[in-house]
Image (cartoon, rainbow, N blue to C red):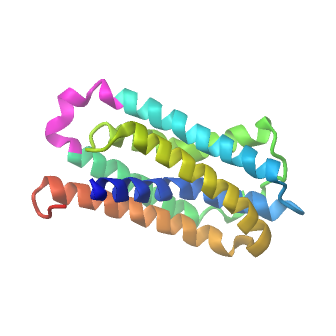
Amino acid sequence: MIAIIVQTLLISVSVAMDAFAVSIGKGLTVSRVRPGDAVRSALWFGGSQALFLILGHYAASAFSAYVTAFDHWIIFGLLAFIGGNMVHEAYEEDAENAKETAQFDWKHMLPLAVACSIDAFAVGVSLAFMATSVPFAILCISVVTGLFSAAGLYIGRAFGAHWQKPAQIAGGVVLILIGVKVLLEHLGVIAF
């Protein structure tokens, strides 16, 4: 049980890294972070993560009976792909992040929230095959993403872009490692 909670928390932090990195970028563009901006950012990113997790979970649940024999490969593949993509994007986003605006209206936040939640759809697919409480995972990932995005605004404002790339790389590496762990568990190499 503890291992599942720790795994869920690690996934939560990892999936939140895209929103965290984008929020740091937004924090760079504001003269000061107002509490309302932090709340809006948290709701946009956390809510979008929840929606995409649910959509991914339900999409996969429809097919789970057909793929249980190789579900560990699906989990590994998705998490390794998402993690690798996060690491790759960390090195390509400097120009993109320079275009961030200080606006927090729906026209600016919706595309950012959706872009940061595409990975959550794939994680939602993975949740359908993992031994975890899906409602707990969705709640945990959404809340952690919201908190990280709000914190990212303040960190971006205070410290600049120094933490943006390392956060995204760390999130990607953790997802890859969780995928490897799931694969090795299902293959009987390790047991937790």
Is residue 98 visible in the rendered image? The answer is: no
Q: Is residue 76 left or right of residue 123?
A: left
| Residue at the spot 73% in from the left edge and 47% down from the top edge | 39
Q: Is residue 70 left or right of residue 47?
A: left
Residue 96, by quadrant, is bottom right
| Residue at the spot 46% in from the left edge and 41% down from the top edge | 138
Residue that extends furthest to the front in the rendered view of this protein: 1
For residue 64: magenta?
Answer: yes
On screen, residue 104 above or below 148: above
| Residue at the spot 48% in from the left edge and 63% down from the top edge | 171
Q: Position of residue 32 (x, y in %)?
A: 87, 62
Q: Is residue 108 left or right of residue 111?
A: right
Q: Position of residue 122 (x, y in %)?
A: 42, 42
**Majority secondary structure in the magenta region:** helix
Viewer-proximal residue among 107 and 6: 6
Q: Position of residue 5 (x, y in %)?
A: 35, 54
Residue that extends furthest to the left in the rendered view of this protein: 188
